[in-house]
C-alpha cells in the first residue's frame, strides 16, 4: 500500500505542472458582422480600430489605459525635438524594432512612407489630419524630420498610435497592395494570422516585439452581432471579453454575474444634432433655437443610464483639451420652444425630414429625441436606411438634420475643425463632417491652430464654442462612455481608464491570473 501511495503521489506531482499551465489564448466577442479594414489608415469603425491597435505602433503613444494627450510617451521614436518656432520636428527611432512576418527592421523609410500614405486621400481616410505637414525627410535610417507649413496645437497627436499615426511596413504594402487591408504588417505585440469572414479574426503573438514577448499567445476576435448571443457566450465562458452595451440595465445585470468586471472608460462619444443652417426651415435661427430648447438632456441621460452616459455640455466633448461649459448652451424649456416656433411662423408645428441609420443603438436614441421634439411641435420625418447608406447620404448633404456620435483625438481643435470649420463643409473639395454648414467660428478655429501661447489658445477655443452654440449649428445631447466586460481572471496589465482605440488595449503585459 505504501509503495502504491508513493507512486500515486509521484504521478500527481508529475502531472501538476501540466494543469498549472496558464491560459494563453484570449477570446473576445465584438458586436459586428465582420471586419471592415485592417489597414490602420482605413480603420474608421470601432470594430476595426480595436484590433488595429494591437498590431501597430506610432512614433509616440498614449500609455496603456489612458487617453490623456498630456501623457504621450515614447513608442517607435525613442526621442524627439523641435525648433523654437514649432515648425520642424526631428524624431529618432529605436534601433532593432522588427516588423511581424519576417518583413525586417523598421527604418525611417517606413515612417516616411507611412505618413505619406496616411496623408493621401487615395490611401487613407485620415488625410486631412496631415495637411499641416509640408515635407517628410529621411535624415538617416533611424532619423525622420517633419517640416510643417504652420504651427499646430498638438503635433505629437498627429503621430501618435491612432489612425493617421500608425506606422506600416512599406515592403508589405507594396507587395500586397489592396490585400494589405485583410493581411496587414505592423510592429505591434500581435500580428495577423487568419480571418474567416463573418466568424472571426485570429491574431498571434509577435514574440520579437520590442517591449518583450506577449504573455498572451493567441487572440480570437469573434464577430457576434447579436447582443443575446454574445452575452450567452460570455456567461458560458466561451468569451473572456465582450463588447458591452452602453445601457444601465445591461451594466447592472452583467455586474451581478460572478467573477465579472465591467469596464466603463473614456473617450466618450458625443451625440449631437447637426442642423443645416442654410436650408428652410433651419435657416431661421428661431427654429434652431426651438430644437435646442426642446432637447431634454437629463431625460436622455436617464434613458441611457447614469453610469454609461452624461449630458453633453458643449459642441466639444468633456475631457478634451479646450472644452468649456461656459458657452451659453440653451437649457430645456418647452414653452420657449413653442413660442419661438410661433414667432417663426409655425404656430401649429413644423415637420423636418431626416435621414436616420437603422443601427439599433442609433435608431433607439433617435426615437427618444424624436419624442422630445414632438412635444414642442417639431415633427421629425425619419427616412430609416442601412448604416452604410446613412453615411453616404449625410455626406451628400441629403439630411437637413444629422444625428452623429463621435469620439476624436481629445483636443478641441480636431472636433471644431472637422465639424464646424467652413473647410469641412460636406460636398466641398475639403469636406469632412461639417453637416451644419457652420462658418461662424473660422477665425477662432484657425487662430487657435497656430497660437503657441496655451492660455490664448484656450481662450480662442472657448470663444469658438460660444459662437457655434449661439448660432445653434449643433445641439449637444449626451455623451456615451465605452463599455466592455471581462472575467476577473484576465488582467490587462494596466488600469483601464481610457483607450483612444475605443477598446481594451491588449499588450505584452496582458495575462490570465
Image (cartoon, helix red, strand yellow):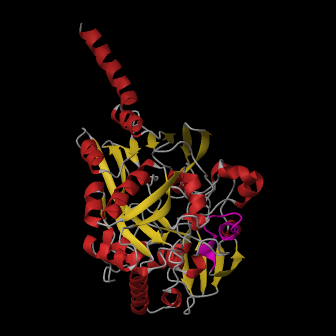
Residue 318 visible here: no
Location of residue 372 (image quadrant):
bottom left
Quarter of the image where the C terminus is located: top left
Quick check: can you spot residue 474? yes
x, y percent for residue 294: 32, 69
Quarter placement of the N terminus: top left
User: Is 380 a magenta residue?
Assistant: no
Name the residue furthest top: 1
Between 505 and 381, the one lying in front of the other is 381
Report the side of 461 relative to 34 (left or right): left
- Position of 105 relative to 332 (above/below): above
Q: Where is residue 175 in the image (x, y as percent from the top left)?
A: 77, 53
Vertical relation: 219 (above or below) 281: above
In depth, the one of 402 and 460 nearer the eye is 402
Which residue is painted at 68% across and 50% down in the image?
A: 102
Residue 173 placed where, x, y %? 72, 57
Which is nearer the eye, 289 or 211?
Answer: 289
Q: In which quarter of the image is residue 500?
A: bottom left
Describe residue 314's horizontal placement relative to residue 197 as left or right.
Answer: left
| Picture residue at 73% right of the left edge, 52% below the top | 178
Total marks in image: 0
- Towards the viewer: 171 or 27: 27
- Extreme residue in the right direction: 175
Q: Give the range drawn in magenta.
A: 112-131
Residue 306: % across, % down: 25, 58
Amino acid at each position: 500500500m505504501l509503495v502504491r501511495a508513493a507512486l500515486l503521489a509521484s504521478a500527481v506531482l508529475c502531472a501538476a505542472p501540466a494543469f498549472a499551465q496558464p491560459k494563453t489564448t484570449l477570446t473576445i466577442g465584438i458586436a459586428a458582422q465582420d471586419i471592415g479594414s485592417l489597414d490602420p489608415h482605413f480603420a474608421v469603425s470601432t470594430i476595426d480600430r480595436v484590433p488595429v491597435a494591437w498590431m501597430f505602433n506610432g512614433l509616440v503613444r498614449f500609455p496603456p489605459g489612458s487617453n490623456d494627450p498630456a501623457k504621450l510617451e515614447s513608442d517607435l521614436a525613442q526621442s524627439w525635438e523641435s525648433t523654437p518656432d514649432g515648425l520642424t520636428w526631428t524624431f529618432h527611432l529605436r534601433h532593432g524594432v522588427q516588423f511581424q512576418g519576417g518583413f525586417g527592421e523598421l527604418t525611417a523609410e517606413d515612417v516616411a512612407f507611412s505618413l505619406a500614405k496616411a496623408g493621401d486621400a487615395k490611401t487613407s481616410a485620415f488625410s486631412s489630419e496631415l495637411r499641416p505637414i509640408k515635407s517628410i525627410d529621411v535624415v538617416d535610417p533611424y532619423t525622420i524630420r517633419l517640416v510643417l507649413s504652420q504651427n499646430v496645437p498638438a503635433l505629437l497627436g498627429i503621430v501618435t498610435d491612432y489612425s493617421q499615426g500608425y506606422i506600416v511596413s512599406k515592403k508589405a504594402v507594396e507587395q500586397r497592395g489592396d490585400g494589405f487591408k485583410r493581411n496587414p504588417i505592423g510592429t505591434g505585440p500581435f500580428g495577423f494570422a487568419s480571418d474567416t469572414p463573418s466568424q472571426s479574426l485570429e491574431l498571434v503573438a509577435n514574440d520579437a516585439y520590442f517591449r518583450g514577448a506577449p504573455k498572451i499567445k493567441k487572440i480570437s476576435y469573434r464577430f457576434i452581432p447579436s447582443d443575446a448571443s454574445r452575452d450567452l457566450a460570455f456567461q458560458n465562458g466561451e468569451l473572456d471579453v465582450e463588447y458591452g452595451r452602453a445601457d444601465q440595465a445591461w451594466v447592472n445585470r452583467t455586474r451581478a454575474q460572478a467573477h465579472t468586471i465591467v469596464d466603463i472608460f473614456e473617450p466618450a462619444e458625443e451625440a449631437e444634432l447637426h442642423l443645416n443652417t442654410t436650408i428652410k426651415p433651419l435657416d431661421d435661427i428661431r427654429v434652431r433655437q426651438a430644437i435646442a430648447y426642446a432637447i431634454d438632456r437629463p431625460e436622455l441621460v436617464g434613458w441611457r443610464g447614469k453610469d454609461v452616459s452624461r449630458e453633453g455640455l458643449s459642441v466639444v466633448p468633456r475631457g478634451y483639451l479646450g472644452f468649456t461649459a461656459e458657452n451659453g448652451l440653451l437649457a430645456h424649456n418647452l414653452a420657449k420652444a413653442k413660442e419661438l416656433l410661433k414667432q417663426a411662423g409655425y404656430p401649429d408645428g413644423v415637420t423636418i425630414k431626416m435621414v436616420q441609420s437603422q443601427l439599433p443603438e442609433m435608431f433607439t436614441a433617435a426615437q427618444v429625441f424624436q419624442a422630445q421634439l414632438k412635444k414642442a411641435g417639431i415633427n421629425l420625418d425619419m427616412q430609416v436606411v442601412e448604416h452604410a447608406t446613412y453615411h453616404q447620404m449625410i455626406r451628400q448633404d441629403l439630411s437637413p438634420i444629422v444625428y452623429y456620435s463621435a469620439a476624436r483625438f481629445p483636443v478641441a481643435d480636431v472636433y471644431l475643425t472637422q465639424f464646424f470649420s467652413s473647410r469641412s463643409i460636406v460636398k466641398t473639395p475639403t469636406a469632412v463632417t461639417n453637416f451644419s454648414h457652420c462658418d461662424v467660428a473660422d477665425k477662432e478655429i484657425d487662430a487657435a491652430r497656430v497660437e503657441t501661447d496655451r492660455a490664448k489658445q484656450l481662450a480662442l477655443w472657448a470663444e469658438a464654442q460660444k459662437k457655434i452654440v449661439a448660432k445653434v449649428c449643433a445641439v449637444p445631447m449626451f455623451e456615451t462612455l465605452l463599455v466592455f466586460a471581462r472575467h476577473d481572471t484576465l488582467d490587462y496589465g494596466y488600469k483601464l481608464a481610457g483607450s483612444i482605440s475605443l477598446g481594451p488595449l491588449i499588450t505584452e503585459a496582458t495575462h490570465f491570473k
